[in-house]
Image (cartoon, grey):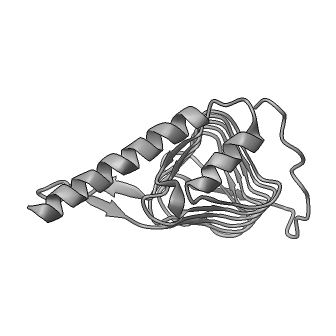
């Protein structure tokens, strides 16, 4: 009985944290937002920017590398480990999940698996990354793709479910993504 009460209290506190971070996501200064995200335990590398409206599920398990941009209204799931590399460009409204329901379980229980995104990856608008996926260095995920399996280095994937549709020609990227806009 006490264990269930403690579990419920932890769930309520996590939901409160998620709600507060959702409101913080609309503060029109990435410096202030980044400050609050770090207080909640998110690791954010130097020069990285999280644009307005981002949604988080348990920010404490999310790690973002250096010079990475997270677009407007992105969803980052931290219910299991989420690691995003350096110089990654995640476009607007991308959803990255590492938890889902087991549809074959009688109790419809949650199942989690970590997600890892390598350096110099580009994820196009409204793409969805599902639990357990690894996206290799330099890969490109096309707009609207649903990624259900690992993506190799420098592969270009698109579609539902995402399939390899090409290969990125640049094999040794060194670019920087630049500064964040002041009020995004």
Marks counted in the figure total 0
Instruction: Judge by depth and name the residue closer to the eye, 39 or 178.
Output: 39
| Position in image of residue 18 (x %, y %) | 46, 44
For this rendering, which residue is in front, 128 or 96? 96
Q: Residue furthest left?
A: 1
Residue 162 locus on image (x, y percent)? 54, 52
Residue 40 is drawn in which quadrant? bottom right
29 shown above or below 40 = above
Foreground residue, 153 or 80? 80
Question: How far across and how far down the image is residue 156, in percent?
Answer: 69, 56
Residue drawn at point x = 49 percent, y = 63 percent: 149
| The C terminus sits in image quarter | top right
Q: On the picture, is 136 further left or further right than 171? A: left
Position of 146 with respect to 158 (left or right) is left
Q: Residue at x 8, y 61 (%)?
A: 1
Q: Residue at x 76, y 63 (%)?
A: 86
Q: Is residue 58 left or right of residue 31?
A: left
Where is residue 165? Give x, y as percent: 66, 54
């Amino acid at each position: 009985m006490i264990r269930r009460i403690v579990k419920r209290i932890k769930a309520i506190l996590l939901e409160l944290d998620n709600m507060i971070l959702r409101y913080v996501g609309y503060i029109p200064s990435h410096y202030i937002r980044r400050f609050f995200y770090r207080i909640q335990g998110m690791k954010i590398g130097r020069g990285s920017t999280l644009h307005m409206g981002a949604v988080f599920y348990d920010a404490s398990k999310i790690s973002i590398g250096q010079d990475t941009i997270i677009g407007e209204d992105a969803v980052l799931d931290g219910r299991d480990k989420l690691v995003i590399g350096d110089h990654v460009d995640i476009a607007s409204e991308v959803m990255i999940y590492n938890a889902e329901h087991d549809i074959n379980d009688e109790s419809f229980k949650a199942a989690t698996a970590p997600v890892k995104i390598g350096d110099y990856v580009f994820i196009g608008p409204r793409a969805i990354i599902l639990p357990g996926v690894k996206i290799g260095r330099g890969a490109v995920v096309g707009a609207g793709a649903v990624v259900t399996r690992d993506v190799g280095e420098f592969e270009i994937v698109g579609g539902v479910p995402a399939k390899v549709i090409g290969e990125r020609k640049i094999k040794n990227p060194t670019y920087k993504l630049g500064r964040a806009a002041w009020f995004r």
